[in-house]
Image: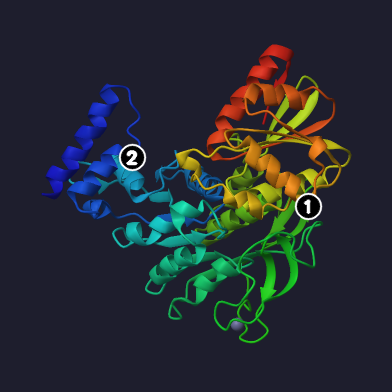
Amino acid sequence: MNRILILTGKAVVGILRLFRRNAGNLPGIILWHLTKGKACSMFRVDCPIIAVTGTNGKTSVTNCIAQLFEQSGKKIIINREGNNLDTGICSLLLRYCDSSGKVDADYLILETDESHVPVVYSQLKLETLIVLDFFRDQLDRNGEMETLIQKINGFCKTFEGNLILNGDDPNTARLGRANPANKNVKYFHAEPYAFATDTIYEASEGRFCPFCGSSLEYDYYQYSHIGRFRCPKCGFGDYKPYITASGIDLDKPVFTADGHEYSTKLNSIYNVYNMTAVVAAAKLYGIEQSVTDSVINNYTVNNGRMEKFILGDRETTLNLAKNPVGANMTLRVMNEQNGEKELLFVLNDNVADGLDVSWIWDINFTIFERVTRVVTSGTRAYDIAVRIKCSGYPAEKITVRPELDDAVEELAKTPGRKFVIANYTAVQPTRSALKRYIAKHGGECGE
Ligand SMILES: [Zn+2]
């Protein structure tokens, strides 16, 4: 039976290839139906599986960990295209297995959607789970965040493998108590960077102890609810970090983790957290220091995350923001920039965006500093304009241009530093519009 199902799935992959179609999730979806949701249990995986989950940073961390092993000469399988649901992972395994379902690799490194962790790893034996953070994200897809955390917590209750957790996120760190018998729980943590604050900066979750309900006390906040916290009553948050990032200087940008200095290409505090998670994985698996250096110091992204463009001669940074934290983070990076600047915000409400755009009300626009003009665009250009106006920003400085090309022209017509924020389905069209502008008026597309 197993063999027939595997061969059916492989046939679907083959047929799609024949038509030059990327198989994507489809073979997995078919197998999922044939097995009544147990598709991942069809495979025989003897190598260690490392999974990365969390709201933000999954793709970066998964790719970097994969590189740690690749550069160490190991054969890895990774869902690089971000097919991170059970059906996507199943499609990936179909591609790499033999007709008996055996998957041949040294390591499987799998970005895994938060809500799919229990489903996938009740069927495949997981060795290491890395949990980066939990933020409110695409509400109508995932349901409330607490439900999501409960799901993963339920999985962690019986999980005995390595659990690497962001110790500065109470939503994540609490998973460390799910299974008191698990001796393989490890936390990563970062010391305050220059823009850490004493008080919380943005609307966010996680301010109360999940165990006793007391208010959590913070030594500092890095961004949103991420920071060094403790529960004064039950001691939640008193852990000894496995890896600590210190000496964080985003101007250079450098940071030290586990006593070793890294100089990275990305200058955001979230990159420091992501790379600290990567250092934790490197330490756990005994990766050579020279390999870890090469991976972390060279890692860069080119997918609308802090991507640089020059429009004519105007320096422009594009950032994807699919949730309030991402957007707040971009606003913060923008504030850290001296001088005046202008913002283009592109908001779509397509199905993949989750239709519900209410998350924009959790973006803290009151932190705007020296933002002299805002242009809005996308299918919900007016909604985002209203949101910004309601934060107290002067209406006369906001221009609505629903068509993207018009919006980019509008943004670039004045000199100075530009920032662009685009949500999920808006980011690729926005990149294209920026490139069209550059093709027409000159400039540069860079990283
Ligand atoms: Zn407590």
Tag 1 near tag 2, CB within 8 Å:
no
Task: Give the class, few, some or many, for how many residues have Cα within 10 Å of label 2's Cα (few <14, many ≥20).
Answer: some
Residue type of the residue flagged with mark 1: Thr
Residue at figure coordinates x 49%, y 38% from the top left = 350
Identify the image's colour scheme: rainbow, by chain, secondary structure or one colour: rainbow
Q: Secondary structure at mark 1?
A: helix
Residue 305 percent coordinates (x, y)? 63, 39
Looking at the image, how many numbered discs can be counted on the residues?
Answer: 2
Confirm whether residue 327 shows in the render.
Answer: yes
Quarter, ligand 1: bottom right
Task: Give me the C-alpha separation between circle 1 and circle 2.
Answer: 41 Å
Where is mark 1, residue-wise?
Answer: 366
Where is mark 2, residue-wise?
Answer: 25
Residue 244 percent coordinates (x, y)? 67, 64
Residue at figure coordinates x 50%, y 48% from the top left = 62
In this picture, is 407 found above or below 306?
A: above
Task: Give the class, few, some or many, for how many residues have Cα within 10 Å of label 1's Cα (few <14, many ≥20).
Answer: few
Query: Quadrant of the rendered structure where residue 20 is?
Result: top left
Residue 77 percent coordinates (x, y)? 39, 44
Q: Which labelled disc corresponds to residue 293?
A: none
Q: Is residue 421 left or right of residue 144?
A: right
Residue type of the residue flagged with mark 2: Asn
